[in-house]
Amino acid sequence: MKKIFLSSLLLLIFFMTACNRDADEFNPNFLHGSWEKSQFYADLEADYVETFVFSQDGSYEHKRSFRNPGTSEELGYSFFATGSFLLEDNLITLIYSRLLISVEEYYTDFEELVEIEEDSGMVTEARLKIKDSGSILIVYYPCNDMLSSSCLGAQTYRKTQ
């Protein structure tokens, strides 16, 4: 009976330290730089590209744009935001200071984006995980209990610079 108890206790300790090691693996220095994810939208014949740029001074830029497929040529923007971010362990808090959106089309020229002033100061929180030696960023957005349609879940970005 003692052997079973000790074996169970050792397994429990192993799993607890394994979980702690995963949490400790987050290195905030890998976050700085540009991150991107993209997918092809057949109905628009364009690549939808979402980009985050995190600076060492605690500021960020977040944009959603459309590009000619397989190129870096921007066709237009659907969303653009700037602000600051706070990082505590792997929890990031994005504090928007400027928010611009396309209101009539999927995308438009940057100059045609409309500024949403009442959302200045809006805050978004997410959990982060960095994988593959700092080349993959996974952002875990919490689901909104009131609006299940607003659940993004995990979003995966690749480091571009």
Image (cartoon, rainbow, N blue to C red):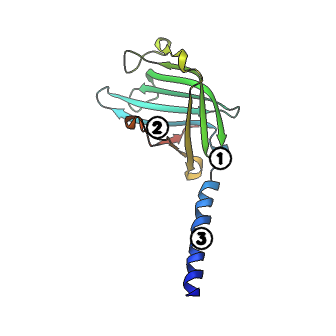
Distance between mark 1 and mark 3 Cα atoms: 22 Å
Residue positioned 59% across, 47% down in the render: 134
The amino acid sitting under disc 1 is Asp
Mark 2 and mark 1 lie on one chain; the one further toward the N terminus is: 2
Q: Quadrant of residue 143?
A: top left
Horizontal placement of 105 versus 15: left or right?
Answer: left
Whether residues under marks 2 and 1 lie with C-beta atoms below 8 angstroms apart, the answer is: no
Q: Nearer the viewer, mark 2 or mark 1?
A: 1
Task: Give coordinates of residue 126: x percent, y percent.
Answer: 55, 40
- Vertical order, 98 against 90 (above or below): above
Where residue 14 is drawn, which disc sits there? 3
Count of numbered circles on the image:
3
Where residue 8 is drawn, which disc sits there? none
The amino acid sitting under disc 3 is Phe
Task: Give coordinates of residue 33: x percent, y percent.
Answer: 61, 36
Horizontal placement of 60 versus 140: left or right?
Answer: right
Distance between mark 2 and mark 3 Cα atoms: 35 Å
Q: Quadrant of residue 35?
A: top right
Where disc 1 sits, the SS reads: loop
- Vertical order, 119 against 13 (above or below): above
Distance between mark 2 and mark 1 Cα atoms: 23 Å
Mark 1 and mark 3 lie on one chain; the one further toward the N terminus is: 3
Position of the N terminus, as image quadrant, is bottom right
Where disc 3 sits, the SS reads: helix
The residue carrying mark 2 is 37
The amino acid sitting under disc 2 is Lys
The residue carrying mark 1 is 89
- Vertical order, 151 against 111 (above or below): below
